[in-house]
Image (cartoon, helix red, strand yellow):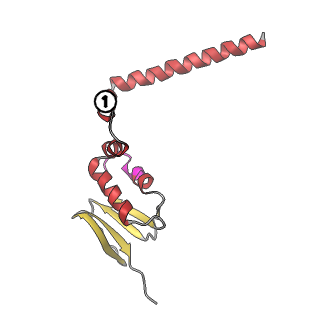
Amino acid sequence: MEKIKSKVIFKIVFISWVIIWLIFLIRGFAKGELKDYKFLWGKTLEEKRAYVTGEEFYKFILFCKRIIPEDSDYTVFANYDATMDYYRFAYYIYPSLRNLYNPEYVACYKVNVSRPGYEYVASLGEDKYVLRKIKRQK
């Protein structure tokens, strides 16, 4: 008797989960996400990342990943839009760690930043560049 109850409960929970999953899938298609899925079909991982992040910002992220060593820390000054770019930058540039207070590197995207004690390292354009802390000689 108890086995039958547990099987019935499992079936109810499973069917409910499938229905909810289908509702969210259909809702996404109705909102126009099918166009994005079609566009991304057959793309490489790098092309998908560039599409989701924005090609220009993704190029800047790859540029920073080449300039900022993995064992150093950084902060970002950027003119972000309403997306999750702030979090994507940290994800893609890992294992370098974000340091808001005393970073070794400063990545600047579409902003003008001049910080005392930092020098210009490399540029991807007039408004996309990386600064590095000047090491004091003893």
Q: Secondary structure at mark 1?
A: helix
Q: Is residue 85 magenta?
A: yes
Q: Position of residue 50 (x, y in %)?
A: 32, 46
Mark 1: few/some/many CA within 10 Å (<14, 14-19, 20+):
few
Number of on-image labels: 1
Question: In the picture shown, does residue 138 fall above or below 105?
Answer: below
Q: Residue at x 61, y 15 (%)?
A: 12
Quadrant containing the N terminus is top right
- Dividing the picture into quadrants, the one containing residue 11 is top right
Q: Position of residue 56 (x, y in %)?
A: 26, 51
Question: In the picture shown, does residue 7 fall above or below 110?
Answer: above
Q: Residue at x 43, y 71 (%)?
A: 104
| Observer able to see residue 114 | no
Question: In the picture shown, does residue 27 fall above or below 47?
Answer: above
Question: In the picture shown, does residue 104 fall above or below 83?
Answer: below
Magenta segment: 80-88
Residue under numbered circle 1: 38
Q: Is residue 60 magenta?
A: no
Q: Residue at x 30, y 73 (%)?
A: 120
Of all residues, the one furthest to the left in this rendering is 126
Name the residue type under label 1.
Lys
- Dividing the picture into quadrants, the one containing residue 106 is bottom left
Q: Position of residue 14 (x, y in %)?
A: 59, 19
Q: Position of residue 15 (x, y in %)?
A: 56, 16
Q: Residue at x 46, y 62 (%)?
A: 96
- Dividing the picture into quadrants, the one containing residue 13 is top right
- Between 100 and 122, the residue placed more toward the observer is 122
| Observer able to see residue 4 | yes
Of all residues, the one furthest to the right in this rendering is 1
